[in-house]
Image (cartoon, rainbow, N blue to C red):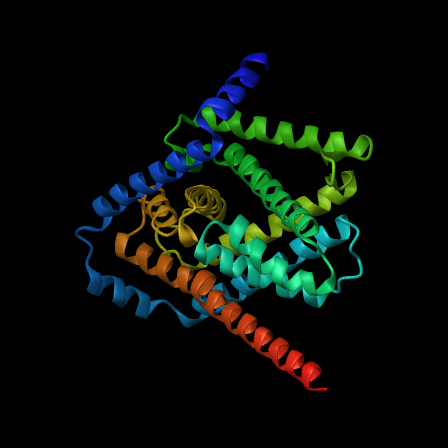
Amino acid sequence: MTWLRAVARFIDQRIGWHRVGFVLSASIIAIAAVVLYRKLHDINVGKVLTAMATVEYRDVGAAALLVAAGYFTLTFYDLFALRTIGRGDVPYRVAALAGFTSYSVGHNVGASVFTGGAVRYRIYSGWGLDAVEVAKVCFIAGLTFWLGNATVLGLGFIIHPEAAAAIDQLPEWFNLALGVATLLVLTGYVAWVWQAPRVIGRYNWKVHLPNGPLTLLQIGIGIVDLMCCALAMYVLTPNEPDLGFITVAVIFVSATLLGFASHSPGGLGVFDAAMLVALWQYDKEELLAGLLIFRLLYYLLPFALALAILGLRELALGLARKRDVGG
């Protein structure tokens, strides 16, 4: 631990974590660009369009419903966070508005911590939340996301370590050990918050972490969200060969996290490259068709809807201010 602290201090003082993050993001995007070129330079565009046109309507409809269920679950990220910081006065409809629009914008624009945070602040400031409280909401919501991801990946790495190996190119035994370690850390965290009230931060920025039972609820929310999205992707993958839902889910969540780490808008290029590499068993054009439909359902349509909702909200607020001034 002393050695790790020394390394962390050296990076913080001499290099800067922001530079490390930038290099990591740029590296992931560069590798993804090379992979995409190798995978897609000889792609048959006509075959991709044909594959998109022949996807059954019921599959697209089922995927759309699952995506809607995923975004519905996202609204509880904000509701849970608001209750955690003691703002139970903010109604669900406001939490739902902030949750849906902030994630829809953040997913597509990139740098979701800042873009999603800006959208949340615009909405929650009308209910008296200041910047610190909005930052706390973002933190708790982000914690829900990461706890859910860690649980799904930990279980997935244990059940299907070969699926994880298709993404990280590491030995199966290593991925199995990584899954066990992840679940042990999660268990330790739950036990830690279960024993006594836990507070992190200092001065004016302190967050009371959810207790043990609420942390389990938090993990459950994250799992439901991820499973809805993974199921939507699974529905849109080719029928043959049948790799099984768990395999596709592990690959999907891993690819999503890579896209998130790259800070590429919507994980564009990074997510797709990871899926194409890991799901090599599928016909390339048919898989790409499924990925394009998923991107339309999960990214573009919610983004357009969120922009429309935010635009109408600003118009309504502007008209209300004019009436107040005129009165």
Is residue 208 positioned above or below 42 on the image? above
Is residue 290 positioned above or below 245 on the image? below
Quadrant for residue 54, please give it.
bottom left
Name, please, the residue furthest toward the bottom.
327
Q: Name the residue nearer the viewer: 114 or 160.
A: 114
* In the displayed structure image, the side of residue 194 where residue 201 appears, left or right: left
**Quarter of the N terminus within the rendering:** top right
Residue in the image at 62% along x and 82% along y? 319
Name, please, the residue furthest toward the right.
196
Residue in the image at 39% along x and 27% along y? 170
Residue in the image at 67% along x and 46% along y? 140
Quadrant for residue 313, please give it.
bottom right
What number of labels is visible? 0
* In the displayed structure image, the side of residue 116 where residue 125 appears, left or right: right
Quadrant for residue 143, please give it.
top right
Q: Name the residue nearer the viewer: 85 or 63.
A: 85
Residue in the image at 41% along x and 53% along y? 265
Name, please, the residue furthest toward the left.
42
Give the percent coordinates (x, y) of residue 224: 61, 52
Give the percent coordinates (x, y) of residue 74: 61, 57
Give the percent coordinates (x, y) of residue 250: 48, 42
Say if residue 157 shows up in the picture. yes
Give the percent coordinates (x, y) of residue 245: 48, 49
**Quarter of the C terminus within the rendering:** bottom right
Q: Name the residue nearer the viewer: 320 or 57.
A: 320
Say if residue 69 shows up in the picture. no
* In the displayed structure image, the side of residue 7 where residue 193 appears, left or right: right
